[in-house]
Image (spheres, helix red, strand yellow):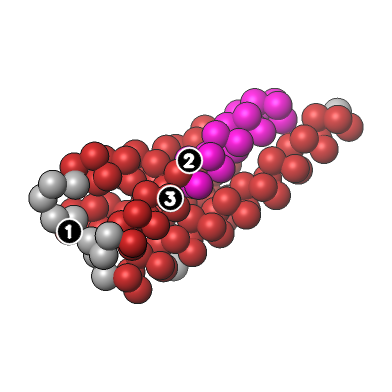
Amino acid sequence: MTHAITTGFAHQRLDAFHVAMELTVGVERIAASLPRGHADLKDQVRRAASATMRNITEGANRMAPRDKAARFVIARGESGECDAALEMIERLELAPIRDVRVLRMLADRVGAMLTGLIRHQQRAERSG
């Protein structure tokens, strides 16, 4: 996985951000190839992937553990929504199954990483 220019922002240090970015880019490619008549699904999967990445970014750059955890919880929900939309694309056979399954694995991976980040922030809030 190659990364674009990195900055000093906290999200750049999170593997979850980079995996979410990879998911978002992959979803954009799949969405661009969806056949006509599936605009709602195309819009939904794009928004869910993008929201996952954006909420990870926002959470990472917040200061308070509670604020961080809240954004990570939202991002986790969005990654699940992204997976559900990708499953729909898979079941309807609207895109190559292999490509969709790779993206579903990325969504699952991001969700797992976010679970860890959420737990970490919840522990930090309790101890701080």
Lower sequence index among marks 1 and 3: 1
Q: Residue at x 40, y 62 (%)?
A: 103
Q: Nearer the viewer, residue 97 or 124?
A: 97
Q: Nearer the viewer, residue 59 or 82?
A: 82
Residue linked to disc 3: 84
State the residue lying farthest toward the bottom: 98
Graded by Cα atoms within 10 Å as few (under 14), some (14 to 19) or many (20 or more), the crowding at tag 1 reads: few
Residue linked to disc 2: 78
Q: CA distance from mark 2 to mark 3?
A: 10 Å
Q: Amino acid at mark 1?
A: Ser
Lower sequence index among marks 1 and 2: 1
Q: Amino acid at mark 2?
A: Glu
Q: CA distance from mark 1 to mark 2?
A: 22 Å
Residue range in magenta is 61-80
State the residue lying farthest toward the left: 36
Residue 113 is left or right of residue 106, and the answer is: right
Q: Which element type, helix, strand or loop, lies under badge 2? A: helix
Q: Position of residue 101 (x, y in %)?
A: 40, 67
Q: Report if residue 13 lies within the magenta region.
A: no
- For residue 128, above or below residue 43: above
Residue linked to disc 1: 33
Q: Which element type, helix, strand or loop, lies under badge 3? A: helix
